[in-house]
Amino acid sequence: MYSRLVNTSERLVAATRELLWERGYVGTSPRAIQARAGAGQGSMYHHFAGKHGLALAAVGRSAEELREAAEAVLGGPGTAYQQVRGYLLRERDVLRGCPVGRLAMDPEIVADDALRAPVEETLGWLCDRLAGVIGQGVADGEFDRGLDPEATAAALVAVVQGGYVLARASASPAAFETAVRGALALLGPAAPETAR
Amino acid sequence: MYSRLVNTSERLVAATRELLWERGYVGTSPRAIQARAGAGQGSMYHHFAGKHGLALAAVGRSAEELREAAEAVLGGPGTAYQQVRGYLLRERDVLRGCPVGRLAMDPEIVADDALRAPVEETLGWLCDRLAGVIGQGVADGEFDRGLDPEATAAALVAVVQGGYVLARASASPAAFETAVRGALALLGPAAPETAR
DNA sequence: GTCTATACCCTGATAGAC
DNA sequence: GTCTATCAGGGTATAGAC
């Protein structure tokens, strides 16, 4: 496991990230983290201040990766519509859900400001970034002049987060794709040719 | 607690429903259920076959209530747009999230077909019901003729589910309302007067 | 840095008295 | 129907040897 990660510390963070993604904070135990990282009890408490400290490191790292992945598409080439579409249709492990958004449903993450902060910042950044792209599209005459970039961006980010819920409920990625398709169709009036 | 509920059995189900809503299946213990219901250990195991059986009863009941609440709006008076808008803007305890959709993020619910089934059926029913309303709106010329009712309905249900994520991440209902406003604006072209 | 030992409470469940 | 007793194991953490 994690054979490429030489540091015990890095393996612990990687294991924690996976478990938080799969089971949330409430459902993740230090014991499970140690088992997945191949590290002992003493080793874990030497490197981190318990489950909470480990979660802080893990959440920070996941937040960072989400931004990089989003920026790769939203800062890429193409029209505003193509960038938005690229983000919505980017490859995702749909049935696993969002490693960051998932944490917002965990009662102990939401109750802890230090753990909630990176979640809030990341989703806030994503909405803002998307709003910027949409605003540019409006300025370019690509979208309807009356479109509110902030509200539209929030709706699109919500479609993605809610798409995961629909997909997991039906144990199939199809529901996610249907929701995204519906959102993109509403976002028009980009002509089908532009949509390529 | 639950003073109106005379049956121990009913109090146990009510307590389980609340805890599943707040903490999910993974985060809910029989002990916590008993404490909230004001019931003893033996009492709980007399009425139900453990945590799993209790969860089955609780999820079924929550699913039923969600349908009733949705039907009250979607089957109510008004144009298709008004019905959809009524559903999206219906009063919600936004920071608590969706009592049914929330379960789709729980690893043990998703891994258990008996527990996942009511979640899938309820969200599926909701998408279908909303698609019916939208389809009627298209037939009435209220919405664009090219609108795909199923995909649009899925997108709107996803906006609600994802809106909860955004709201909880920022510890404020505002993000939910922004996302819903963005979605309704995209859904137009109902004129503002019609939107009343 | 990593290990084992230990602590103390919680979890999910069963047994049997009342 | 409800109670208390009990159980084997897990959750989270500390102590101290190596």
Image (tube, coloured by chain):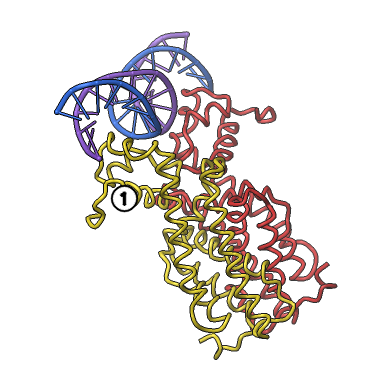
Chain colours: A red, B yellow, C blue, D purple
Specify the amino acid type for callout 1: Glu
Left-right relation of A8 to A173: left
**Residue B196 screen position, x and y as percent:** 50, 87
**Residue B174 screen position, x and y as percent:** 46, 69
What is the quadrant of residue A50 in the picture?
Answer: top left
What is the quadrant of residue A182 in the picture?
Answer: bottom right
Left-right relation of B29 to A99: left
Taking the spot 57% from the left edge, 53% from the top edge, the residue there is B120
Closer-to-camera residue (B154/B184): B154
**Residue A46 screen position, x and y as percent:** 47, 27
The residue at which mark 1 appears reads as B10
Residue furthest to the bottom in view is: B193
Closer-to-camera residue (A41/A171): A171
- Tell me the element at label 1: helix
Q: Chain of mark 1?
A: B
From this view, report whether residue A14 is shown above or below residue B138: above
How many other residues sit within 10 Å of disc 1, few (<14), some (14-19) or many (≥20)? some
